[in-house]
């Protein structure tokens, strides 16, 4: 299981996540911030849990590229 978490409130809209992991992230047209697709919101933390191991590599690249470190990726 791959767990990806985005702290959206702190997003600065740099677009790296959408570039590195376009299947998982998009930029909002409303406010220019990142959106973690198919995620659940819990107090500003958006979490996606997926059994797909293919999610790890692109999401990890996005997390490492994020200049404000608001993306975390874990394997359980």
Image: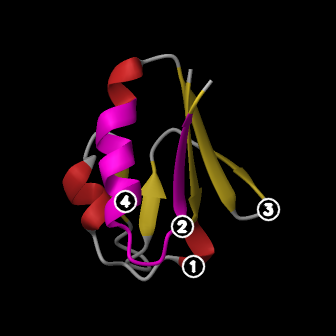
Q: What is the distance, in whole Å, between disc 2 and disc 1 at their CAs?
A: 7 Å
- Disc number for residue 10: 1
- Is tag 2's residue or tag 4's residue first in the polypeptide sequence? 4
Mark 2 or mark 1: whose residue is earlier in sequence? 1
Q: Which residue was labeled with disc 3?
A: 43
Figure label count: 4
The residue sitting at 79% across, 62% down in the picture is 43
Q: Are marks 2 and 1 in contact (CB under 8 Å)?
A: yes
Magenta region, residue range: 56-74
Reply above or below: 27 against 26. Answer: below
Q: Which mark is residue 64?
A: 4
Residue mark closest to the camera, 4 vs 1:
4
Q: Mark 4 falls on what kind of element?
A: helix
Real-space Cα separation, disc 2 to disc 4, in angstroms = 10 Å
Left or right: 52 as drawn, with respect to 57: right
Distance, label 4 to label 1, CA atoms, is 16 Å
Q: CA distance from mark 3 to mark 2?
A: 14 Å
Q: Give neighbour class at mark 3: few <14, some 14-19, many 20+ (Cα, 10 Å).
A: few
Q: Is residue 68 magenta?
A: yes
First in sequence: mark 3 vs mark 1: 1
Is 7 left, or right, of 30 in this rendering? right
Could you tell me which residue is drawn at 25 percent across and 47 percent down? 22
Mark 2 closeness class: few <14, some 14–19, many ≥20 residues within 10 Å = some
| Quadrant into which the C terminus falls | top right
Choose top left, top right, bottom left or bottom right for residue 10: bottom right
**Label 3 residue SS:** loop
State left or right for residue 68 relative to residue 9: left
Q: Quadrant of residue 18?
A: bottom left
Picture layout, residue 39 above or below residue 25: above
- The residue mark sitting in front, 2 or 4, is 4
């Amino acid at each position: 299981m791959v767990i990806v978490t985005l702290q959206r409130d702190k997003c600065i809209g740099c677009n790296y996540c959408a570039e590195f992991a376009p299947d998982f992230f998009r930029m909002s047209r409303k406010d220019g911030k990142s959106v973690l697709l198919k995620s659940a919101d819990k107090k500003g933390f958006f979490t996606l849990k997926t059994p797909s191991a293919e999610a790890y590599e692109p999401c990890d690249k996005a997390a490492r590229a994020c200049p404000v470190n608001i993306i975390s990726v874990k394997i359980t």
